[in-house]
Image (cartoon, grey):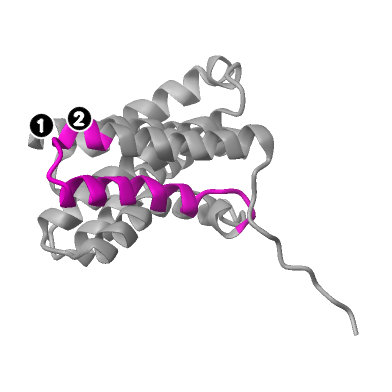
Amino acid sequence: MHDFLMVLDLVGTFVFAISGATLGVRKQLDLFGVLVLSFAAAVSGGIARDLLIGATPPVALAQWHYLGVSCAAGLVTFYRCDDVERLRNPVQVFDAIGLALFAVTGATKALAAGLGPMGAILLGMLTGIGGGMARDILVARVPVVLQSDLYAVAALAGAAVVVAGHWLQLPGPPVLLAGALLCFGLRFMAIRYGWQLPVAQHRRD
């Protein structure tokens, strides 16, 4: 189970890093700026999770794999940005994949740290949305999670599947995949069909 979690964590790191690097290229940052944005997008959620559950130092800073994977994704995106941009909405698609993977791994690690069901669901959501928030804030963009798209709700749903599977004592890997697929599916459908939560309407006196 530990190795499976590690694989999901690194895949999530890679795709989140691509989303950050792609946005950095669009903002015409230099190579260092693109790598900083890719690393911030890739590890911010995991660092927040580890600090909250008392896992110090955070695994993203203690193990070289996370820096290496995020830098590799940043370099690939920087030098092959045209290939990445051929994908439809690459920032949103890769962000959706990272959101799904980090939501389920975050909930799993929260449960392993002894958190209750609600705490694990919330920490899974935080792990999923943290990287996207850091990425958007660094380029002075309103974070996606604060806008109308189904973003945090999708992460909550994926994390809830993991918690429910843990409570029912179901096998770990299939539950993680089911939670990730639900989260990604909700986020992808929101991108494709414009699903959204109600938006605040400003009323003038």
Q: Is residue 129 magenta?
A: no
Q: What residue is rendered at 15% in x and 37% in y?
A: 172
Q: In x, y percent, where is residue 129?
A: 42, 52
Does residue 31 appear anywhere in the picture? no
Position above or below: 53 against 29: below
Per the image, the residue denoted by label 1 is 3
Per the image, the residue denoted by label 2 is 7
User: Mark 2, residues whose alpha carbon is within 10 Å: few (<14), some, or many (≥20)?
Assistant: few
- The part of the chain drawn in magenta is 147-176
Position above or below: 195 against 174: below
Q: What residue is rendered at 27% in x and 51% in y?
A: 46
| CA distance separating discs 2 and 1 | 6 Å
Q: Does the magenta stretch include residue 166?
A: yes
Does residue 129 appear anywhere in the picture? yes
Q: In x, y percent, where is residue 63?
A: 14, 42
Q: What residue is rendered at 70% in x and 61% in y?
A: 199
Residue 174, picture quadrant:
top left
Q: In x, y percent, where is residue 58?
A: 18, 54
**In front of the other: 169 or 8:** 169
Instruction: Name the kind of residue labelled 1 in the image.
Output: Asp
Q: Which quadrant holds the C terminus?
A: bottom right
Q: What residue is rendered at 64% in x and 54% in y?
A: 148
Q: Label 2's element?
A: helix
Instruction: Name the kind of residue labelled 2 in the image.
Output: Val
Q: In x, y percent, where is residue 193?
A: 67, 35
**In front of the other: 156 or 35:** 156
Residue at far bottom of view: 205
